[in-house]
Image (cartoon, rainbow, N blue to C red):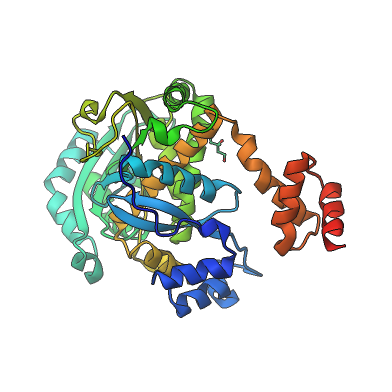
Amino acid sequence: MTVPETPAPLSGLHRLDPAARLDLLQQQRRLDERDRAVLDAGLSLPEADAMSENVVGRYALPYGIATNFLVDGEELAVPMAVEEPSVVAAASKAAKLARPGGGFRTEATPNLMGGHIQLVDVPDIAAAQRALAAAERELLAHIPIRGSLLARGGGPRSLTTRHIPHSEAGPILLVELTMDVADAMGANIVNTALEALAPLVAELTGGAVVLSILSNLCVQRLATAEVLYTWNALADSRTEGRHLQRRIVQADALAQADPHRAATHNKGILNGVEAVAMATGNDCRAVAAAAHAWAAGEGRYRGLTRWTVVPGADALPQDSLVRARDGEPSGPLLHGRLTLPLALGVAGHSTRAHPLVPVSLKLLGNPDARRLARIAAAVGLAQNLAALLALVGTGIQAGHMRLHARQVALAAGVPAGQAARVAAEMVASRRISTEAALSLHSSLAA
Ligand code: MEV
């Protein structure tokens, strides 16, 4: 029944202190001395000043490593920048539980980003659409393209139109540009192209340009992750694994049926996806905007993941990315799938501005943009499983309590080196408060 499982290369990382964690990452040649120095120094004030405006300081986030991730057969150390306690631990736990089922399998479409020019007061919309269709090649050729984008296989792909007959501002003609932005996030590339096209489009159609901007709802740039959880991997000392599989499917059904639950369900997914996006210098607001718009794509806001129980790997859907392996555990199997639009870049000035970005990318094996999106999707799926497993099992607060207690201890002024011990004592005594933290700290010091 059990598949021989290779231990994760970073298992036990959480038991070390930060310096020992870095030693381990260095021993495994995932990082070197220079990377350590960069992690230590973080973003400098001049770098911060160059990134934004009216800068007076830097706001640092915890930067942790999610362990146990086996994604398409590759062992990964996943950097996550996030302030919320439990997120990194939860992702690592879900990744560990996924290993007996073979880990995560992923795919991503090409890096196609879209954008639009909004035209109003077009005298003859049908004639304008015909003129634009006839001039498509010429217009695309007019777009200024940097050599580096062409070298990476990127460039404009199509120019189409969409008529919105009724809006508060009257009829709108949208001119929609699609570009392959290669390894960039793509906002600058698409916006530059649209602004270059706008005057030509206005002249050709006789309309007035209102705005030209990319769309964050990048429906042509999708990342998918899938995973299988064996029932015995999910079981704990209190709860039978098949029962947990069924409960997770029921919890998922609520996220499909009700937007109030779906928002929280998707927030949990984004805990993972955004933490990877943040660590790799990507625009988290763009990631969240795309995910939420996609979740509402069928006219009602829904959960982004789908969880089903199948009797065995043979019963998986035809288009499934996960497959039966030799020695695969028999069913029932909990099958999870997450698809979301994900515009993550690994090239481009904005992505590279933060000194930690190259370190994060190195930890991930220097992925291209599609691979990064696939990894982030796997982390989002893991995050969702961890949340659902906790919710249908012991509840979310049990896992949060120790980390919450640590924050209470730190806020009470307990030194960082002793906060974990004080927190553990507070949880054991079920007294989590500033007073308890201070009294435990002074009794430990005595
Ligand atoms: C908390 O940050 C995320 C969860 O609320 C997600 C969920 O409920 O699925 C635990």
Asked whether 48 or 71 is in front, the reply is 71
Q: What residue lies at 22% left-to-right and 40% top-to-bottom?
A: 325
**Residue 253: image location, x then y, percent:** 43, 22
Is 262 drawn above or below residue 360 in the view shown? above
Find ligand 1 in the image and state its quadrant: top right
Asked whether 75 or 45 is in front, the reply is 75
Q: Residue 367 sits in which quadrant?
A: bottom left
Residue 354 appears in the rendering:
no
- Quadrant of the image for the N terminus? top left
- Quadrant of the image for the C terminus? bottom right
Q: What residue lies at 49% left-to-right and 52% top-to-bottom?
A: 275
**Total marks in image:** 0
Q: What residue lies at 67% left-to-right and 46% top-to-bottom?
A: 402
Asked whether 119 or 26 is in front, the reply is 26
Q: Is residue 393 left or right of residue 308?
A: right
Is 195 drawn above or below residue 205 in the view shown? below
**Residue 354: image location, x then y, percent:** 48, 69
Is 27 drawn above or below residue 106 in the view shown? below
**Residue 342: image location, x then y, percent:** 36, 47
Q: Is residue 399 left or right of residue 335?
A: right
Residue 330 appears in the rendering:
yes
**Residue 250: image location, x then y, percent:** 45, 21
